């Protein structure tokens, strides 16, 4: 057998063994994690399916779902996913090809560079495409049911998804390899520029939608909106191919559908082939440049901000202030953390800003109250994801340098409280701004706005304490990858406790205010009666006190557990 054939078989055997070992570990050691992922994914998929299904039914009341407007919706949806996949795949492949330990081992093996690239490329595709399938499949199923599409539509939809993912994967791989060769030291700068460009494009699109003339859902408004979104239907974009192909298959036009599928798959193969050729010629030089580009230079660009931080928080003891500053510097120097933070909370802020343009503020009080608590729940869920992903692994990432913390001239409990202060401070600023913006856009009133702000503060303190406390109680000092720490038993338990805490805090005031505003609605007045505001506010104070009690328990208990464990830890 030719050497290339033996190498391909070796990599195939390696992938099969890795999958088998991972599956065995999940079934034998991480059943809680597996069950949590499956349950959460199922709930998320079902929620998206209901959302898309109701959306298509709403469109069907005005236009046929196979009409032009659906093609525009599909095009803009898949164009957004194309950009997200392009960036995420590029980041994943850059880390896998140039930063991972396995890459150093494989580069020392007799395997050629393009085979190493193919192995890591398949891993990156599997890691980045599952989220795309989780987002795209409920939309396809909902559209197929609503439009009464024939059964081959679903099989073709899966084939379209597979081909679509490979295109941004190949382009992202080429970008990662070129970045390593041309700018090995400027990866953070490039990521920052890309983030700014994406944010600028998002703001520009939002402004275009915001300034669409005409009353909402009128013919004039719809035509103007379609004109402004016409850029997403360019015939050279893969998002246009998948949108047109899926619509053709839903209508039973198999010739057009197979044509677009052929275009999609041929370009996917071309993208991978181009990436493999680039990897064959430039992967090893780029790897050498990345290793040689590491430097121990000290950066002083943020000296003014650090000095302002010291002066603003001079009331905090200096050792603790230095610990908080260390965590703040780690956060801003890690593009993975601040980029995901900006993306998630930036998209949420973009939605809140457009609430009035969507007409939600002119709905009745019952709907506005319901939407305000839904916005609060979504903000809390994103915050819990952030704390579980980045705050929980903070102490574990100290790793081999943990002994330095033991030498600090401060008590160990002060170190834990310093990490809590950092987590609570950064989350409190972001979430309070979002919730105040949501309440102002929905015009929920001063009392409800103050209640939402208080609930957010309780959530920030509780979620930060849960992540810091459990992170100190269940550290993983042998792992250097924060995503693997967050995906372990401790991270899974932290996420479950965070979700339960969010439910206990939001449920009392949400249920009470929901019943009150439902009683104001004429359709439900017979069941609940029309209540005056004198009924609502005293009971909201009681519900707020219950939420505050849960918040105090979630703050004190995990912190005490974490402090006790950290003080007893042998460093």
Image (cartoon, rainbow, N blue to C red):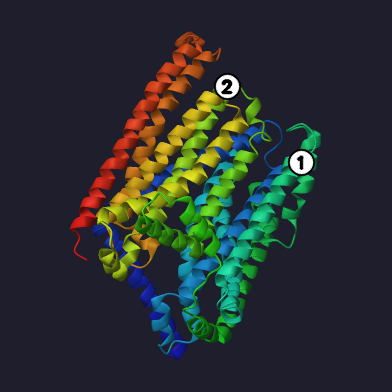
- The percent position of residue 372, horizontal first and vertical second, equals 53, 31
Categorize mark 1 by other alpha carbons within 10 Å: few (<14), some (14-19), many (20+): few
Gap in Å between the C-alphas at discs 2 and 1? 26 Å
User: In this rendering, would 351 be left or right of 431?
Assistant: right
Relative side of 40 to 185, left or right: left
Q: Is residue 77 above or below residue 174?
A: above
Residue at the image position 58 percent from the left and 66 percent from the top: 191
Residue at point 26% right, 53% down? 413
Marks 2/1 in contact by CB < 8 Å: the verdict is no
Q: Which residue is mark 2?
A: 365
Q: Who is closer to the viewer here, 177 or 293?
A: 293
Q: Residue at x 38, y 66 (%)?
A: 481
Image quadrant where one finds the N terminus: bottom left
Q: Pointer 1: what residue? A: 211
Tell me the crowding category of disc 2: few under 14, some 14 to 19, or many 20 or more residues within 10 angstroms, Cα based: some
Question: Residue 73 got which mark?
Answer: none
Residue 561, given in percent of the width and then of the height, sits at 23, 48
């Amino acid at each position: 057998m030719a050497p290339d054939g033996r190498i391909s078989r070796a990599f195939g055997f390696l992938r099969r063994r890795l999958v088998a070992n991972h599956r065995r570990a999940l079934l034998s050691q991480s059943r809680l994690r597996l069950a949590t992922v499956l349950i959460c994914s199922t709930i998320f998929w079902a929620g998206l399916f209901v959302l898309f299904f109701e959306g298509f039914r709403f469109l069907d009341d005005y236009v046929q779902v196979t009409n032009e407007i659906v093609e525009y919706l599909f095009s803009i949806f898949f164009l957004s996913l194309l950009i997200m996949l392009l960036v995420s795949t590029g980041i994943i492949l850059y880390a896998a090809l140039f930063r991972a330990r396995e890459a150093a081992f494989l580069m020392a093996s007799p395997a050629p560079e393009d085979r190493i690239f193919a192995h890591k490329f398949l891993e990156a595709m599997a890691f980045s495409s599952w989220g795309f399938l989780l987002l795209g499949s409920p939309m396809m199923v909902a559209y197929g049911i609503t439009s009464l599409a024939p059964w081959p539509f679903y099989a073709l939809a899966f084939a379209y998804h597979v081909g679509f993912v490979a295109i941004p994967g190949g382009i992202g791989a080429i970008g990662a390899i070129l970045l390593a060769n041309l700018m090995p030291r400027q990866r953070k700068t490039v990521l920052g520029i890309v983030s700014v460009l994406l944010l600028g494009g998002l703001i520009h699109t939002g402004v275009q939608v915001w300034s669409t003339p005409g009353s909402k859902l009128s013919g004039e408004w719809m035509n103007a909106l379609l004109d402004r979104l016409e850029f997403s239907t360019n015939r050279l974009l893969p998002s246009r191919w998948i949108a047109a192909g899926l619509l053709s298959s839903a209508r039973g036009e198999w010739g057009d559908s197979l044509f677009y599928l052929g275009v999609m798959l041929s370009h996917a193969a071309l993208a991978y082939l181009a990436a493999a050729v680039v990897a064959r010629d430039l992967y090893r030089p780029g790897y050498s440049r990345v290793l040689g580009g590491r430097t121990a230079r000290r950066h002083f660009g943020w000296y003014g901000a650090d000095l302002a931080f010291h002066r603003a928080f001079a009331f905090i003891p200096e050792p603790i202030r230095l610990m908080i500053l260390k965590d703040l510097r780690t956060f801003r120097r890690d593009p993975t953390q601040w980029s995901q933070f900006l993306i998630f909370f930036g998209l949420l802020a973009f939605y809140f800003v457009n609430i009035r343009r969507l007409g939600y503020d002119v709905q009745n009080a019952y709907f506005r109250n319901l939407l305000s608590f839904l916005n609060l729940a979504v903000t809390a869920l994103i915050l819990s994801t952030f704390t579980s992903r980045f705050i929980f692994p903070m102490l574990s990432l100290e790793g081999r340098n943990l002994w330095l913390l033991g030498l600090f001239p401060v008590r160990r409990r002060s170190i834990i409280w310093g990490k809590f202060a950092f987590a609570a401070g950064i989350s409190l600023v972001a979430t309070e701004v979002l919730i105040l913006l949501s309440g102002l856009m929905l015009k929920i009133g001063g009392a409800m706005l103050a209640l939402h702000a208080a609930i957010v503060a309780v959530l920030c303190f509780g979620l930060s304490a849960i992540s810091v406390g459990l992170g100190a109680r269940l550290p993983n000092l042998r792992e250097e990858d924060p995503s693997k720490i967050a995906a372990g038993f401790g991270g899974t338990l932290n996420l479950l406790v965070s979700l339960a805490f969010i439910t206990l805090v939001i449920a009392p005031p949400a249920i009470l205010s929901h019943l009150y505003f439902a009683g104001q609605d004429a359709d439900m007045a017979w069941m609940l009666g029309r209540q005056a505001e004198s009924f609502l506010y005293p009971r909201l104070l009681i519900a707020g006190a219950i939420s505050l009690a849960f918040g105090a328990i979630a703050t004190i208990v995990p912190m005490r557990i974490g402090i006790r464990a950290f003080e007893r830890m042998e460093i």
